[in-house]
Image (cartoon, rainbow, N blue to C red):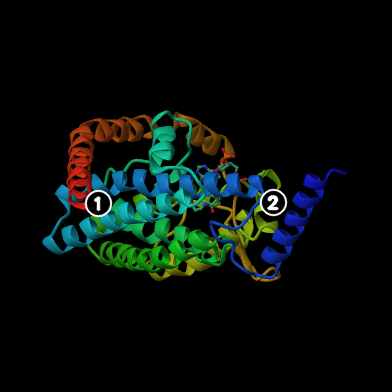
């Protein structure tokens, strides 16, 4: 074995021991290239989800039914933009620029969460996104605050605090509709019927079909498997549904006393594959809007660069 190989093996071993002893990996630490690539993939995908995830709710800002609801919705959508920016910054600490990750999304090379490819035709969808989509996001992301990579873990602490406010406003909105007129009750039930299965898909493929889970868990990036988190979401959400007098569109759902969990039906994985493959109900529209916003913002980027250049020149004149 060459001296270099022994050195690399030594570093691998030290890295593994560091991670197994629950210490954080920081940007300047040595890390295996595959660990770095896994984080770049997950963090940038997560960032893109937050940015594309502004669209389904942004659709309702001009039509929110009261000033209070409009203020809440604007604040929520702004928070999502902020989450995207923290996450692009976390990815930059791994050596990929935000320009590059955004270019990959525009080029269709990068994924974002399947859930944001579904439409929001009714006001109830805004309550359901806050309640169900943010609940699922929180269940997935709270363990990521203990992820082995320091910048991602720290970003997650703040993001989860904001997501928990989002979840509460969604539950409160859904509760107002569930306790409202028969038309409002029917609207919120219809929305649950459309969102239930797509929300369960947010957790990713079943464990035996998830190519990345085992290694990501060994590296302590992911702390729980996709199926364990999905089960936690179902167990937590069904009593909330019952409290609101709502039902989920799953004839196989039932409490399993022996397991201490709800049993639930099989997800339509063909639909999941279609949606992450670009053929969901709104994939095209989401990407067209994203590319258009980028093109429309060209003048802002040019003006900011010209301003920075002007400041740089005047700073260097002052220093001379
Ligand atoms: N959609 O082996 P695994 C939010 C892909 S943020 C699309 O299980 P992994 C806040 C996966 O990337 C929501 N693709 O992969 C909000 C991989 O593809 P690749 C986003 C999916 O990474 C609320 C392949 O399938 N949250 O909601 C999906 O170990 C309201 C194989 O899968 C995060 O990103 C999916 N649902 O586990 C914003 C959290 N599932 O890369 C606005 C961080 C799987 O090989 C409004 N991410 N894939 O081409 C994670 O925890 C993980 O990346 C998982 C997937 C659990 C999503």
Residue 307 in percent (x, y) is at: 17, 42
What residue is pinned by disc 2?
215
**Can residue 211 be seen here?**
yes
User: What is the C-alpha distance between the residues marked 2 and 1?
Assistant: 41 Å
Of 182 and 284, nearer the camera is 284
Residue 41 in percent (x, y) is at: 54, 44
What residue is pinned by disc 1?
123
Residue at position x 36%, y 34% from top?
A: 282
Q: Quadrant of the N terminus?
A: top right
Q: Does residue 207 lie above or below 26 as drawn?
A: above
Q: Does residue 143 lie above or below 198 as drawn?
A: below
Q: Residues within 10 Å of mark 2 (few under 14, many from 20)?
A: some
Residue at position x 27%, y 63% from top?
A: 173
Residue at position x 24%, y 44% from top?
A: 59
Task: Count every numbered label the image shows and give the total.
Answer: 2
Image quadrant where residue 30 sits: bottom right
Residue at position x 55%, y 35% from top?
A: 273
């Amino acid at each position: 074995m060459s001296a270099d190989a022994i050195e690399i093996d030594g570093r691998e071993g030290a890295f593994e021991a560091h991670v197994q002893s629950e210490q954080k990996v920081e940007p300047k630490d040595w890390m295996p290239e595959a660990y770095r690539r896994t984080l770049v993939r997950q963090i940038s995908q997560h960032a893109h989800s937050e940015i594309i995830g502004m669209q389904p709710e942004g659709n309702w800002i001009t039509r929110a039914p009261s000033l209070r609801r409009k203020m809440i919705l604007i604040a929520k959508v702004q928070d999502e933009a902020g989450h995207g920016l923290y996450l692009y910054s976390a990815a930059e600490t791994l050596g990929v620029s935000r320009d590059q990750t955004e270019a990959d999304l525009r080029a269709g090379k990068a994924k974002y969460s399947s859930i944001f490819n579904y439409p929001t035709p009714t006001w109830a969808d805004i309550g359901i996104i806050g309640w169900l989509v943010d609940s699922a996001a929180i269940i997935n992301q709270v363990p990521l605050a203990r992820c082995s990579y320091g910048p991602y873990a720290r970003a997650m602490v703040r993001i989860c605090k904001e997501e928990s406010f989002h979840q509460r406003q969604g539950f409160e909105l859904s509760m107002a509709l569930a306790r409202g007129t028969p038309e409002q009750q029917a609207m919120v039930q219809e929305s649950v019927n459309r969102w239930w299965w797509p929300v369960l898909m947010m957790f990713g493929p079943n464990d035996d079909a998830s190519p990345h889970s085992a290694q990501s868990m060994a590296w302590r990036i992911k702390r729980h498997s996709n199926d364990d988190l999905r089960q936690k979401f179902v167990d937590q959400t069904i009593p909330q549904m019952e409290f609101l007098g709502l039902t989920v569109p799953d004839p196989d759902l039932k409490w399993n006393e022996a397991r201490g969990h709800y049993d639930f039906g099989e997800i339509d994985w063909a639909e999941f594959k279609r949606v992450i493959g670009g053929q969901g109900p709104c994939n095209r529209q989401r990407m067209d809007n994203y590319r258009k916003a980028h093109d429309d913002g060209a003048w802002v980027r040019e003006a900011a660069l010209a301003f920075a250049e002007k400041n740089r020149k005047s700073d260097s004149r002052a220093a001379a």
